Image (cartoon, grey):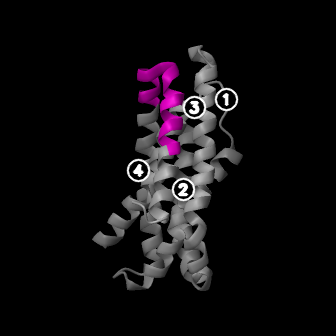
Amino acid sequence: MFEVILLGISLAMDSLSMSIVNGIKYKNYSKKMMLVSSASFGLFQGTMPLLGYLIFLPFIKYVDEIDHWIVFMILGYLGISMIIEGIRNNDEQEATSESFSYKILFTESVATSIDALSVGVTLPSLAVNSYLSCLIIAGCTFLICLIGHSLGKKIALLLKNKAIIFGGSVLFLIGLKTLLEGLGIL
């Protein structure tokens, strides 16, 4: 059980970063949206290993060959867009005026959970039932993301209009790290 919790925590790190960035970036990011977002990240993090185990097992090899590129393209694009937005907006209120949407949430949830597909291959080797493992992963991600959203709001207050540039830089660097790891450079 302990190894499943550690797995859940490690898989949640990209979602944590995204939660922090969302807390920084979006003015309309209410407590309800924080709960919905955390649930979405948890759902995708918990579902992807199960999909990898049940459906994509024969294709995992091919997904592993390109998943780092997909994550890099999505997070890199989001990060660079945020950096450009932060540089263009000198006014503190304008810098956080973009509204959060379910389309954005879906894209983020998929991008941060793609790497969890390959974890599905390891599910049978864990001491805990595969379905329970996925629930634990989802729960860990949900709780960690709730913390991330609150932390993001605090960072936004602290950094003010520089927060979007910071958040964009974090997203881009996570995407770059994922790419470099996938290429075997890191």
Which residue corresponds to mark 2?
A: 112
State how far apart marks 3 and 1 are (Cα): 14 Å
Question: What's the magenta region?
Answer: 153-172
Q: Would residue 24 appear left or right of 186 to someone viewing this image?
A: right
Label 3: how many residues lie within 10 Å, few (<14), some (14-19) or many (20+)? Answer: many
Amino acid under disc 4: Ile
Which residue corresponds to mark 4?
A: 144
State how far apart marks 4 and 1 are (Cα): 24 Å
State how far apart marks 3 and 4 are (Cα): 25 Å
Label 1: how many residues lie within 10 Å, few (<14), some (14-19) or many (20+)? Answer: few
Q: Nearer the viewer, mark 3 or mark 1?
A: 3
Q: Quadrant of the N terminus?
A: bottom left
- At 50% from the left and 77% from the top, the residue drawn is 120
- Mark 3, secondary structure of its residue: helix
Snapshot quadrant of residue 132: bottom left
Residue most extreme to the front:
185
